[in-house]
């Protein structure tokens, strides 16, 4: 169980990308938290959202939200506004690295495809920005709140030593810049909001499954462990953390 005492009692939360992997685990753990009221679980097919049988569902609010379709984001924000006065935590979790249709991380320049580059940007970078656009009015004006997007260390320009993975690296680097932009603008109107980028490490999910072969066992995190670590970071954030790119262990990742 995770507590979010530093965000205040009975906060309402939005988890974007809630149907799989880390998103679903965020929803599960947040529903167990005594500090959380409603958990808005945004995904493309909310009717198919499946959680473990022992998950409390009193505060669960499935929500149709497709980050590649701005109309669904706007409609979702309107739906949330009818029931939640404010959101104390907004989590952008959905991301794309590879697809069943054959999209894969590029190993070299010759493998770069325009469609993959644009799709990665649309989901990984533009999606969280559009969520900010439509859900920012639900942030509290003065009370503490957190807007967090799951990034990745491979999106760090300063840490790039291996190359490759053009679409994923570039889209996450773009997401990082947009998060940094939000960390400058949003606090002008919503004084208590903290905007951060989070790196969960390598987690045992469908996204990382093809690339786990060289990951030491102690650095391959379960979903439960990864989400607990990230919620712990969120719980401990202070004013000096505004606009940071933070790894799972609390360390700062260079942009």
Image (spheres, helix red, strand yellow):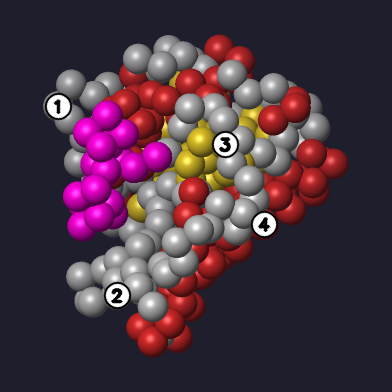
Residue 76 seen: no
**44 left or right of 67 in image:** left
Determine crowd level at label 2: few under 14, some 14-19, many 20+ residues with C-alpha closer than 10 A. Answer: some
Q: Which mark is residue 246?
A: 3
Q: Residue at x 26, y 68 (%)?
A: 99
Splitting the image into 4 quarters, where does residue 98 fall?
bottom left
Q: Residue 27 placed where, x, y %?
A: 35, 33
Q: Residue at x 30, y 40 (%)?
A: 203
Magenta region, residue range: 201-220
Determine crowd level at label 1: few under 14, some 14-19, many 20+ residues with C-alpha closer than 10 A. Answer: few
SS type, badge 2: loop
How much space separates mark 3 and mark 2, taking CA atoms?
28 Å
Q: Mark 3 touching mark 1, by CB under 8 A?
A: no
How much space separates mark 2 and mark 4, taking CA atoms?
24 Å
Q: Mark 3 touching mark 2, by CB under 8 A?
A: no
**117 left or right of 22 in image:** right
How much space separates mark 1 and mark 4, taking CA atoms?
39 Å
How much space separates mark 4 and mark 3, taking CA atoms?
14 Å
The residue wearing badge 4 is: 177
SS type, badge 3: strand
Q: Mark 2 touching mark 4, by CB under 8 A?
A: no
SS type, badge 1: loop
- Mark 2 or mark 1: name the one nearer the start of the chain: 1
Splitting the image into 4 quarters, where does residue 30 fall?
top left
Q: Which mark is residue 103?
A: 2
């Amino acid at each position: 169980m995770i507590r979010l005492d530093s965000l205040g009692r009975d906060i309402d939360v939005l988890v974007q990308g809630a149907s799989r992997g880390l998103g679903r685990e965020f929803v599960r753990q947040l529903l167990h938290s005594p500090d959380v009221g409603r958990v808005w679980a945004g995904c493309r097919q909310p009717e198919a959202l499946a959680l473990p049988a022992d998950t409390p569902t009193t505060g669960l609010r499935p929500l149709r939200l497709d980050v590649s379709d701005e109309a669904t984001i706007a409609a979702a924000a309107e739906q949330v506004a009818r029931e939640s006065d404010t959101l104390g935590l907004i989590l952008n979790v959905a991301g794309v690295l590879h697809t069943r249709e054959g999209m894969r991380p590029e190993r070299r320049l010759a493998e770069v495809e325009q469609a993959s580059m644009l799709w990665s940007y649309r989901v990984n970078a533009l999606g969280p920005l559009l969520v900010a656009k439509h859900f920012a009015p639900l942030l509290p004006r003065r009370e503490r709140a957190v807007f967090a997007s799951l990034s990745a260390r491979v999106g760090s320009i300063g840490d790039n030593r291996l190359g490759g993975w053009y679409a994923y690296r570039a889209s996450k680097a773009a997401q990082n810049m947009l998060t940094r932009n939000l960390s400058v603008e949003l606090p002008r109107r919503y004084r208590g909001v903290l905007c951060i980028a989070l790196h969960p490490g390598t987690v045992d999910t469908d996204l990382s499954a093809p690339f786990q072969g060289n990951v030491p066992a102690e650095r391959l995190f379960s979903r439960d462990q990864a989400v607990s670590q990230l919620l712990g970071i969120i719980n401990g954030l202070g004013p000096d953390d505004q606009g940071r790119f933070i790894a799972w262990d609390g360390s700062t990742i260079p942009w």
